[in-house]
Amino acid sequence: MVSHERSESVDEGSRPMPRTPATRADWQTHPAPDARKRIPLSRAFTADEMARVRLGLVPQQMEDKWFVFWEDEKLFFHRSWTGFCTYIVSFEVADDGGGGMLDALVNRDLHEYLNTDDGYDARMISYLIDVLLLGQPGEFPTKFTDEDEQTLEQWSQVGRAMMGEGPQEE
């Protein structure tokens, strides 16, 4: 694992930004499986938000559930424990630095990822970007109605990020 230096500067209401973006080489990962599905996405980001998205995320402890990196106008989401690729999100980047999500390739290999609900995946991608990369609250897309099950699901998906904590703060 490669160490990332952290900046001391903090924008109001957001997490510190690492100086070095995460790269594919920062974590042991597996390629996306052949079993995948393309789902449409539509969400715009400001230039500042896109700068944060492009930095990605390198896990620092067991409770950090995702490794995220930017490469070739795409954002790759890998589970930190297994290295499995769950999402590859394609972006369009504007000349001013802003941009937007176009679509995502979603893992549909049931040995790696059990979900098959496209709407859930679209909401989860947005949530992960909000909570993990932008450091802002997001609405967790739970499938459960029981509060205890919701909490357990959220912990299994984002770990300590559900409490507003993450590697950017270390």
Image (cartoon, rainbow, N blue to C red):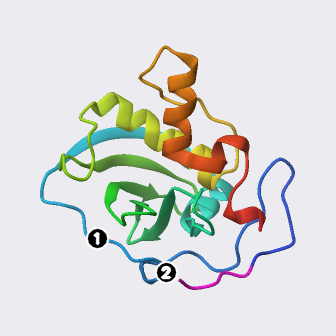
- Residue 30 got which mark? 1
What amino acid is found at the position of numbered circle 1 in the picture?
His
In this picture, residue 67 sits left or right of residue 85: right
User: Please, what is the dominant secondary structure of the magenta stretch?
Assistant: loop
Residue 4 colored in magenta in the image: yes
- Horizontal side of 51 relative to 142 (left or right) equals right
Residue found farthest to the top? 145
> How far from the left and from the top, in percent, is residue 88?
34, 57
In the image, is residue 138 above or below residue 58?
above
List x then y, in percent, for residue 6. 76, 76
Q: Nearer the viewer, residue 8 or 46?
A: 8
Is 83 positioned to the left or the right of 65 in the image? left
Query: Which label number is shown at residue 26?
Result: 2
| Location of residue 37 (image quadrant) | top left
- In the figure, is residue 24 to the left or right of 162? left
Q: Which residues are magenta?
A: 1-5
Give the quadrant of the C terminus: bottom right
Residue 113 drawn at (x, y percent):
27, 47
The front one of 80 and 129 is: 80
